[in-house]
Image (tube, rainbow, N blue to C red):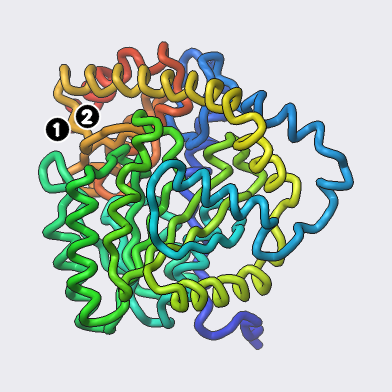
Amino acid sequence: MIPMSFMKQSADLQPIEDTVFAVVSMAKQDIAEHGAEAVVDATIGSLYDEQGRLVAYQNVFDHYNAIAKEVKAAYAASFTGNPGYRTQVRNWVLQDQPIKLNASVIATPGGTGAVNMTMINVLEAGQTVVLPEICWGSYNLMAAQARLKTASYAMFDGDHFNFASFESVCRQVMSEQGRLLAVINDPCHNPTGYSMSLTEWRQIVHFLNELSKQGPCVILNDIAYIDYSYQGLHSRDYLSCLNEINENVLAVIAFSCSKTLTSYGLRCGAALILGQNARRVREAEIVFEKTARATWSNIPNAAMENFTWITTENRAGFEAEKQRYVDLLKQRSQCFIEEAAACGLLCYPYKEGFFVTLQMKDNALRDQYHQKLIDNHIYTVKVNKGIRVALCSLSLSKVQGLAGRMKAILDSLQ
């Protein structure tokens, strides 16, 4: 007698294949066998210093360590987040941008919680979410868990955003289901490091306003890496374009304290809802509140209190410390991009952020190349039509000469 499955009939029983952590494990094993100097581990999507240590900001963790144990142990004031935290997330995300929209903030476990919360509440099972063709793999996993289909738009037309593809895919999805949820990971796109221009954002807003005559449109803007933009306060300039959305367009911004504060394991973030119509924003807030209560109930009280204190009472110290690492990222990326251009190693258009992605004409070549890099003690992450290089975790000395080595390995396959 074959035992029956205890899982629901629609459950996906295929084991999760987390290629990132698998390659990370291989890199660690290689380092243990051959030493750190012989290995390039460009897999880790966290910020590391020049000595190869995970960065944990002193201006963040000195205060966190001093928070009373009772505060760390306590429930948050509400499952929607502590009031002061919700206010400060709005202030921090928008900063000096003159946003005239109705707004609400719901605390989430990292930016991931905000993305997932939006997917499961905007679309019905069986409907389609629009994603970038090159993207963080967990978008697809979250969509699958919500029983959603996906449609992908091409990220690039030459060295700029492929608006024609975005428009075409969104129109097709709207014609099929009468509503739209589209994900844009910007600025500092994971994994390419692209950031859209104000002109590109205005074009998207204008298009969504026009498309929304056929049905409601939600734009999910994942800003996980915004605080590592090389533009400083100007990284937020595009947000003013959202003032032009009409009443049939809603924006949800997924914010990650985890990235901003180098506190990846503390799982603290938020969904910032923006819209012209106060009633519609409140509807989204109510639905998100219920999801928060039913899914995670609470996020870490001390993490929220720490973010609020750091970004108000200790803002200058925190920003000065963070800026040193933004400058370091800029050095690393400038070195890699210049050397890649010099040797003819093709990368997708990079502007800023943690990652650079090499262009691969097809995924078969990508797979071959990825293995060949591993054979040469270079560890990267496969993405659709590309190879992601995590400059955030590589010292400048590791970056120097890396593009040339990678190009030579690629040439050996062709």
- Please give the name of the residue rendered at 25% of the width and 23% of the height, measured from the top-left corner: 337
Q: Quadrant of residue 113?
A: bottom right
The front one of 255 and 133 is: 255
- Please give the name of the residue rendered at 72% of the width and 52% of the height, measured from the top-left corner: 300
The front one of 148 and 372 is: 148
Q: Is residue 124 above or below residue 388?
A: below
Task: From the top left corner, tell me how far across and down residue 46 is, in percent.
Answer: 52, 34
Compared across the picture, whether 134 is left or right of 73 comes to left
Instruction: Label 2, secondary structure: give it.
Output: helix
Task: From the top left corner, tell me how far across and down residue 250 is, in percent.
Answer: 37, 68
Mark 1 and mark 2 residues within 8 Å of each other at the beta carbon = yes
Q: Which mark is residue 245?
A: none
Q: Quadrant for the C terminus, please.
A: top left
Task: From the top left corner, tell me how far across and down residue 112 is, in percent.
Answer: 52, 56
Q: Which kind of residue does numbered mark 2 sit on?
A: Leu
- Please give the name of the residue rendered at 37% of the width and 42% of the height, measured from the top-left corner: 236
- Residue that numbered label 2 is attached to: 410
Compared across the picture, whether 237 is left or right of 65 comes to left
The front one of 62 and 158 is: 62
- Please give the name of the residue rendered at 38% of the width and 82% of the height, measured from the top-left corner: 126
Q: Is residue 289 above or below residue 298?
A: below
Tell me if I can see residue 140 in this picture. no
